[in-house]
Image: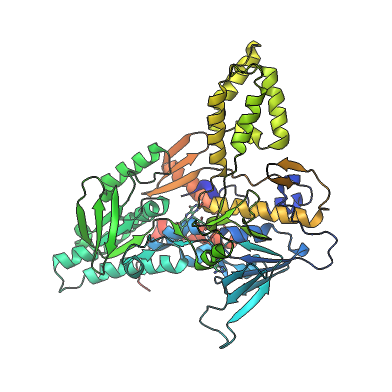
Amino acid sequence: YLLAVAATGCFGAGLLVALADAGQDNSSSGSDEAVSAGNSRKQKVVILGTGWGGVSFLKNLDSSKYDVRVVSPRNYFVFTPLLPSVTSGTVEARSITEPIRRIIRKKDVKFHEAECTKIDAANKKVVCRDSSDVKCVGKEEFELEYDYLVVAVGATSNTFGTKGVEEYCHFLKEIEDAEKIRGRIVDCFETASLPHLSDEDRRKLLSFVIVGGGPTGVEYAAELHDLIHEDLTGLYPELQKIVKITVVQSGDHILNTFDGRISEYAEKKFAREGIDVKIGSRVLGVSDESITFKSKATGNLVEMPYGMIVWSTGIGTRPVVADYMKQIGQTDRRVLATDEWLRVKNAEGVYALGDCATIEQRKIAEDIAYLFKLADKNGDGTLSVSEFVDTMNNVRVRYPQIDLYMERQHMKGVVGLLNDAIKKEKDLKLDLDHFSEAICKVDSQMKSTPATAQVAAQQGEYLARSFNHLATEDPDEGPVRIRGGGRHRCQPFLYRHLGQFAPLGGETTAAELPGDWVSIGRSTQWLWYSVYASKQVSWRTRALVIFDWTKRFVFGRDSSRM
Ligand code: FAD
């Protein structure tokens, strides 16, 4: 669903750019707890995770400068935006994975296929465990010391403690999940075709429920609908009329993080296609036979028999992160809090990115608004153009990101007024309260980091550039910027939202791009194909994915249950 992945620059050319920039990019150093250039021993960097964050960091890091080790229970990277396509067989599982050892083969990096079970904050080491099927008995566990730890372990599926979810629902996070779902759909159809079943049995088996109307839930529902109506109903014609797809959504709309026009379009399209969307409904529990949910509006309880449920309602905390959060006193949250340089709060040498972390909001916006208020010498809430420009220059010294802020949608009014005042050579009438409000909105937009591949990849690239820079720079030199709370030789991480996609099935995709631009239709679907093909991690996976799409167009999807 996310165009996002586009222009993250984390793969391919991004690597070259990042390395070429290393050492001269003053804007990207991480922190002042720097790597000493004079140190003869290479600093030990341990990376936990081989997902979007970890791999983006790894690809952009100049590994010759550090002693780098990667730990992950998964020895491959998964292109998660295409996971829903694996559930329907539109693309094959192996087409969207890339072995980590291929990614690091030209790098000075060691990979260990294991799970980190504990981060020992006091002793700066991690405890790891081989959780694979083949292990050396009695020697499953080992420890790694670190100078810098990059935590990019992602997140689990959040069940909100709902009864029966763990036991009876499918999740859609990993490759195995997608393959299990694919097998289960076909199994439901085959079982429903057995001769001795009643209509009621068949209806139950062919009742597919998706809990969660976010981008993943909606994309999966659309894939399922396409699979059933383009391929399976032709193969099981007698079952066509009794198949049912239901999306249970607790919010008032599906795709509620998207532009209203997109959610409205998606709801209408689903209604036309017979996908039943139950908005404002909270799931109370799941048993082996049925799912029970309650309508918030009417208070009515609905008990619905099902053949398969896919649970897709947001993210939870991995145990290793929860344990670490206890050690460093971050117990009141779901993910690790970092500062804008991605340094974990209350920890030394530890960075976190991607789904397992969030940047704690600082009050930059208030600082900026305050500086503008100070410039209002008459106290009448207005500034002359020259006062505005002088203040901008002052602000820019402390907050270079102000220029980026001014480009955002919320600042359009201010920029318009400013241009108008310059053109007419008159005083700028700027309502400072309104200005502060707009700056605060932009600030929270810029710093809010949704749990997406786009964010994780941008953070990985940013952090790698920081490490590259720190390894080459004398920590006592370089531009020093004074920021509230400390001295930093760098700009903080700023998230650039590049837009998002919502595939809606039937060769239709919706895209939301920066600047309030929305596009829905078949041509957007082709844009989606090209973006996702171009963002593949390697030429190998790019070729495989394009081949799978072509194969599906020509022969349809494969409905064998393996
Ligand atoms: P992940 O990519 O989840 O990687 C975590 C890594 O840590 C994995 O390698 C895992 O094996 C490893 N790990 C786990 N536990 C441990 C441990 N204890 N020790 C060591 N390693 C560990 N985002 C978009 O922007 N666009 C999309 O279209 C999109 N579609 C999505 C579709 C689906 C079905 C899903 C599930 C997600 C989608 N996302 C999308 C979200 C995106 O995948 C995540 O935001 C992104 O993967 C987060 O990256 P990450 O590096 O934090 O975590």
* Horizontal arrangement in the rendering, residue 313 relative to residue 268 (left or right): right
Residue 534 at x, y percent in the picture: 57, 52
* Horizontal arrangement in the rendering, residue 36 relative to residue 221 (left or right): right
Q: Is residue 558 visible?
A: no
Q: Residue at x 34, y 67 (%)?
A: 559
Q: Residue furthest bottom?
A: 137
Residue 545 at x, y percent in the picture: 50, 59
**Which residue is nearer to you in this view: 416 or 515?**
416
Quadrant of res 198: bottom left
* Horizontal arrangement in the rendering, residue 504 relative to residue 284 (left or right): right
Q: Is residue 61 above or below residue 499?
A: below
Question: Which of the image's four quarters has the C terminus?
Answer: bottom left
**Which residue is nearer to you in this view: 541 or 290?**
290
Quadrant of res 519: top left
Residue 183 at x, y percent in the picture: 35, 69
Quadrant of res 199: bottom left
Residue 522 at x, y percent in the picture: 41, 43
**Which residue is nearer to you in this view: 193 or 439?**
439
Q: Residue at x 59, y 62 (%)?
A: 328
Q: Is residue 55 above or below residue 261?
A: below
Q: Is residue 253 visible?
A: yes
